[in-house]
Amino acid sequence: MTSIAIDRRREKTDILYVADSGNNRILGFKSLGVCSNNKAQACTNSKDCVDSKRCIINRNKKADKVFGQADFSSAACNHDNMKGRDKEAGNNSLCLLNLPHRTNLAEY
């Protein structure tokens, strides 16, 4: 299950957050690409490009920030600490099981 949220509070580019429940994390992207006429200008959508009407999206862009895991390569639910979904979530500890549709029997 994947969900997105856009933070439009910044003056320059919007920040995009993507919930990656399969890896128990939320990924943050400061931008998704660059403006067509200025490759140094980061953008999330075309409104971020002042002199150009087009934001060129980089489909292979890596996330700038990860929440719910200690790093970009970890994916265990709450650090695989055997407390499963009942442990408090933190900035480097998250469990995004799709309850009640899926359960992780190893956590019980």
Image: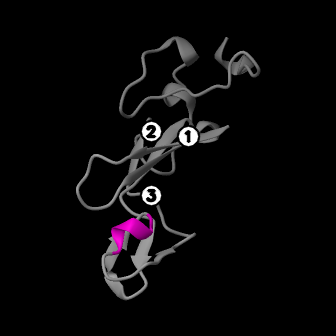
From the top left corner, tell me how far across and down residue 82 is, in percent: 56, 17
Which amino acid type is marked by label 1?
A: Ala
At mark 2, the secondary structure is: loop
- Name the residue carrying label 2: 69
Return the residue found at the far left.
11
Q: Is the magenta stretch mostly helix, strand or loop?
A: helix
At mark 3, the secondary structure is: loop
Q: Quadrant of the C terminus?
A: top right
Along the viewing direction, whichever of 90 and 37 lies nearer the viewer: 37
CA gap, disc 3 and disc 2: 13 Å
- Name the residue carrying label 1: 75
Along the viewing direction, whichever of 81 and 28 lies nearer the viewer: 28
Along the viewing direction, whichever of 82 and 71 lies nearer the viewer: 71
Q: In this view, does 46 lie to the left or right of 18?
A: left
Q: Is residue 83 visible?
A: no
Q: Residues within 10 Å of mark 3 (few under 14, many from 20)?
A: some
Q: Where does the magenta region start and end?
A: 45-49
Along the viewing direction, whichever of 58 and 104 lies nearer the viewer: 58
CA gap, disc 2 and disc 1: 7 Å
Q: Quadrant of residue 101?
A: top right
- Name the residue carrying label 3: 63
For residue 96, above or below residue 20: above
From the top left corner, tell me how far across and down residue 1 is, in percent: 67, 37
